[in-house]
Amino acid sequence: MRFGAIVALWDRDQAISAAASIGKWGYEAIWTGDHVAFTVPISDPLTQLTYLSALNPKLTYGTCVYLLPLRHPVPVAKMVATADRLMGAGHFIFGVGVGGEFPREYEACGVPIRERGGRATEAIGVLKQLWTGQRVEHRGKYFSFSEIAMQPAPATPGGPPVWVGGRKEAALKRAARCGDGWMPYVITPQRYGEGLDFIAREAERAGRRFERFGTGLLLFCALGPTYEEAHKAATEHLSLRYGMDFSEPARRYCALGRPADVAEKISELIRAGVRDFAIDCVCRFHERDAQMEQFAREVIPLVRL
């Protein structure tokens, strides 16, 4: 079981502070989200993680999740291979997803939004071929190129593990057939367990046998003296971020309240199969560091008893 923290950096000073604090507080990983254009400012995830890894090379770093269909997989393969070499073998998890809740970023990137699922699946295959370092030719539905060899290869043999985001059946099939892990968000413990069962059945149908399969979750969290105060803070933050009323989703999917309340929610998710948590403290910006530190100090020990 591993706890990581979601970061969203704006500048160099914040990066230096985050790299020092997150490790000191006891988190083992740093995760970043991804959008080309969003309701709030957001920086490029691969650039953030590579910079952070130079500041604190002992941690694990991951995208949660990178919107793969917005880009052509060949330059993505090059960027990820470079990031993996700079971070060091075994220190990078490449989480990918399809997004779609903000159609304008697909329009801005010149990608038909209805093709995002198919493009993601095909792109994962392209990435894994290129990361072998061998000569590769690809002729697919969405991408086509003549024989090339991408060198140097990633530090991690075969490239970093690709964890697939999403909750719908298409995403679960993608995780089962070409992913190395699953990392959704806004999901209940029951549905998480059902999703893992589905992935196992689908992998068996595809003839895949996993030596290792990551089970992660991006978890929104808000600590407070009462459940209702934590719920109010989470609702305000997430409603602004996603441009919608997040009151009911916050109750359903977030870990809210006192440390014991949050620990109980996490324990339910652990019983459902989650082993990697990317904790996103959803509160007022100036309270975020205090919440992250409190989570590490007061919640994690309760879960690990």
Image (spheres, helix red, strand yellow):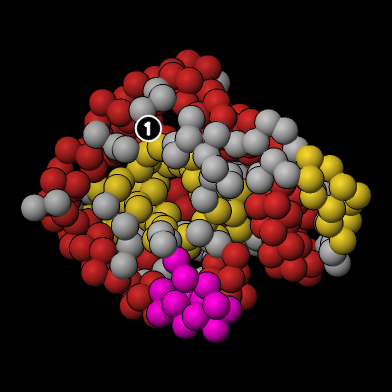
- Residue 203: horizontal and vertical position, in percent? 51, 76
Pick out the residue farthest to the front.
134
Residue at the image point whose x is 25% and y is 48% from the top: 223
Residue at the image point whose x is 56% and y is 30% from the top: 85
Q: Is residue 33 visible?
A: no
Q: Is residue 273 magenta?
A: no
Compare residues 55 and 34 and report the one nearer the observer: 55
- Residue 157: horizontal and vertical position, in percent? 54, 43
Compare residues 150 and 274 and report the one nearer the observer: 150
Q: Is residue 205 magenta?
A: yes
Which residue lies under the disc numbered 1?
Answer: 59
Residue at the image point whose x is 87% and y is 61% from the top: 139
Residue at the image point whose x is 61% and y is 58% from the top: 97
Compare residues 288 and 95 and report the one nearer the observer: 95
Dominant SS type (magenta): helix
Horizontal side of 202 relative to 226 (left or right) equals: right
Q: Is mark 1 on a helix, strand or loop?
A: loop
- Residue 187: horizontal and vertical position, in percent? 42, 69
Name the quadrant containing residue 288. top left
**Residue extent of the magenta highlight:** 195-210
